[in-house]
Every structure is written in structure tokens, then in C-alpha cells.
Image (tube, rainbow, N blue to C red):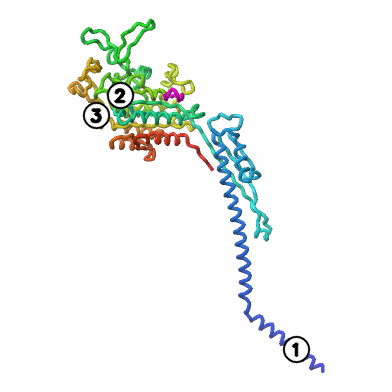
Amino acid sequence: MRFQTTLRIFNERLMFRQKVARFSRNEEGALTIFASFMVLMMLMVCGIAVDLMQNEMMRTRVQNTLDRAVLAASDLDQEQPPEVVVRDYFAKVGMADFVNEIEITPGAELPTTNYRIVRAEARTRTPSIYMAMTGVYSLPVYTSGTAEETIENSEISLVLDISGSMRNNGKIGNLRVAAKEFIDAVLEDDVADTTSLNIVPYAGQTNPGPVVFQRAGGRPFATFLPDEVTGDPVVFGEKYFDDDGNEIDVPYNTMSSCLDLQDSDFNNINLPSGGYDQTPYFMNWSIDAPTMDWGWCPQNRSSIRYAQNDAEQLKSFIDSMRLHDGTGTQYGMKYGVALLNPSSNSTFRALNNAGLVPDRFADRPASFDDDETRKFIVLMTDGQITDQYRPKEDAAWINADQADSRSPLNNRKADRLNPYGQNENVNNFYAVCNQAKDAGITVYTIAFEAPSSAVEQMKRCASSPALFYNARGVEISTVFKSIARQINQLRLTQ
């Protein structure tokens, strides 16, 4: 009996061991377990991805709102306090509680400064759905943004063609409108406090005015022009009177003040100095009296205006400019660049003493490496650079006799000199353009209904192809507005 019991127990144990061995060797169902595990992992990963996607969508919404808010708040024309603007933007999209920090530079104590920096942070959290299973119940949303509007000190030379051909096709009228709109744009509101504008008209020559003429050592070509019959002094163009109201004799060469520059003057971008002959009083081509004044050199009333910021006075000057003979773009560019060169500072102080430059700009032009000052030239022409003609006799009566059909030099070529040919003048023009760009001046150029040669000259002078414009008719206004917008651009920084 006992033996049987022992044998039965032994057999049961043996059978159990065999079953365990067979079970350990059986692979049925293993794939199902693995697949279940992988499905669970994939669901977890997808769930985490959904949580992260929701978090990123919220971050993008908050960031976009923040960028718009700080950009609007940094606008110096914004009438509301910057902090109010930022909070209002968030409140209108239901995110008022998200604003964490707002920093305004330079702050409320300097509301009229020429720059404003607005920095803000926004924070919130997005609830987790799937990640909550792992103990992560929400995800953070941190955003920040900075916007800056800076009205940097700007020095601008507006170099304008007033040659006789501008009378055709209404060009001078379109230019006057466009130039006045440009003046309004670059001298708008607080910008005027930090922007000085030189207006440099040019025809055959550029007239720097009597003060600069004398400072440069200008040598008048004649004390007066004698009547060829009586020998008495003769006054051309306008009558002059003394303090008692008596008509007086005035040397006619005081009508204009152009300096006859030499080739070497185009190897630098300084104002002329050291002594120059005065450009004679003459015409090469016939005058169109309704639109033009006599002279290859613009008369003093159409001379350069220095470092101004009174928009109304400048617009009045634009309206009063008269056309003259020739196209000496190289002279206009030379003076335009020189008036942005810090080497001209002593002349600006002298012009300030003479009441021709406002006190706030007496210390201009600023240094080329001044980080707070930008320098621009806007050069416009409607024609190619011409030869530089001169009369053989500077003070010959016939040069200024508007009633004599022989007076223009083109009608008496035997009396005409051509000391500087067209190619030489074009090369001088390019030399000044290159020096301006090398100095860091931004050069915009405009060919206004100009021939192909002038178009090429303007293209080569511009700081880049994108800063050259080719305009016709009223398009000139659009061009000037585009340039003004670029000068007054608003920057968003991250």
C-alpha cells in the first residue's frame, strides 16, 4: 500500500515536470503579448505628440499676439502708453492673464526720445491629456519678443536736376510734387528733430552760395560788366537798391556763385577749398524764359540749401527753383556727398553763424563711424552728363546779353571752349559715387524719363541695383515715397 502511494506521487510529480517542460517549450501566444505591449507604447507616443502639438499651437498663438503687440507699442507715433497697448492686444484675444513682464526703454520719463524699445514676456500652461498618465499634468508656454523703432540721426542730401530739359512733358511740375511729398515724409512729426536735409539743385553747375564761395577762395571773374559803349557798370536780371532806396550798380557776377572745380576735386569728397575761379555767367543753349533763368551756373536764389528741417520753407524753395542750362550731375553729386562728410563741419558752423543752418545742426555732419547717424543721398536726373562748356572771354558782354540771338555759345562756337569733355565728367561722377559708397553713405538714384546713357549712369552710382529707380510721369511720386519709407523704416527684432 505504501509502495503504491509512493509510486503514485512519483508519477504525478513526473507528469507535472513534463507539463512544465512542455509549457516552457511552447511559443504559442508570445507574439500577442509583444503586440499588445507595442500598441500600448504607440498609444502613449501618439498621446504625447497630441499634447505637444496642442502646446505648440498655443505657443504660436501667444507669440504672434506678442509680436503684434510689441510692434504696435514701439511705434513712436503711438498715442497710448506702450504698456497699455501690449495689455490691450492680449485682452482682446482673451489672453489678458498671460502677460508676465513688460519692459519699456527708455521709459515713461523720456516720452519724446528718438527711440523706443518694447520688450515683453507672456507665460501660460497647456493641460496634458495623455502625459498626465506619466505624472506630467501640464506643459509650459514661454514667449518673449522685442520691437524697436529708432529715429536715428539722419543726414540727407536731396540732389535734384534743374536743367532746361526738365521743362518738357511736365517733368519739373511732377518733380516739385514728388520732392515736396518726400520732404513731408522724412520730416514728419518727431523725425524732424533728428533729420537734416540738404537740397542740392544742379544744372550745368552747382551753386554753393556766396558764403561757401568765399570760404573756398572763389575768385570773381570780373568786378563788373561794363557797358560796351559807355563803359558804365550794368546790372543784369534784377535791380538793386541801397538803404536809402537809390538804385545802385552791382557786379553782375554776384547773381551766381559757382566754383570752377578741377579734375582733382573729384578724387575726394570734401567741400572745395584753396581758391577757384568763378564759373562765368553764360548760356550754351537758348533760354526758355518762362521756365529758365539765364546761366550755366544756377543763380543764387537756386543755390544749395544746407541742413534744414523746416518742411514748409524747404517746400517753398522747391516751388521757387528755376531751371538753368546744362547737366553737370558730377557737380551735384560732389556737393551732395561733401555735405555729409564730417570734414565740412567748420563750414556748417560758419553757415550757422550766417543764419543759414539751424543751431541744432551746427555740429553736423556727424562722423562716418557714428552708430547713431545714417547718411543718405537721393540723386535724380532726367538727362545724361554733358560737356562742360565755357566762353573764351569770361567777362565778354555778349555772354550775358539775353536780347542778342548770338549770345548762347552754341550759336558762336568760335568763342566756346570745352575744358572738360563728357567722358571726363562721367568718370569724375563715378569717382565721387564710389567714394560715397565706400564711406558708408546709402545712395539712391532716380532716372526720370532719361535716355539710356543716363539710366546706366544712375544704375552704376546707386548703392545696389535695388536702390536704383527708373520712373516716368507721376511715377516719380511713388519712387520718392518708396525711398522715404525705407529711410523711416520700422524694425522688429527677436
Q: What residue type is labelled 2?
A: His
Looking at the image, is mark 1 or mark 2 earlier in the sequence?
1
Q: Is residue 296 above or below residue 74?
A: above
**Residue 78 x %, y %:** 56, 34
138 sits left or right of 384 in the view: right
Q: Residues within 10 Å of mark 1 (few under 14, many from 20)?
A: few
Distance of label 1 from label 2 (alpha carbons): 131 Å
Q: Which of 384 and 464 is in front in this view?
A: 384
Say which element carries label 3.
loop
Residue depicted at x 30% and y 24%: 324
Distance of label 2 from label 3 (alpha carbons): 19 Å
Please identify the quadrant where the C terminus is shown. Answer: top right
Residue depicted at x 80% and y 93%: 3
Distance of label 3 from label 1 (alpha carbons): 128 Å
Kindly indicate the quadrant of the structure image that contains residue 198. Answer: top left
The extreme bottom residue here reads 1
Visible in this render: residue 191?
yes
Q: Is residue 191 above or below residue 359?
A: below
**Residue 374 x %, y %:** 45, 32
In magenta, the rendered stretch is 306-315
Q: Do the residues labelled 2 and 3 touch (CB within 8 Å)?
A: no
Q: How crowded is mark 3: few (under 14 residues within 10 Å), some or many (20 or more)?
A: few
**Numbered mark located on residue 10 in the image:** 1
The extreme left residue here reads 414
- Mark 3, residue position: 421
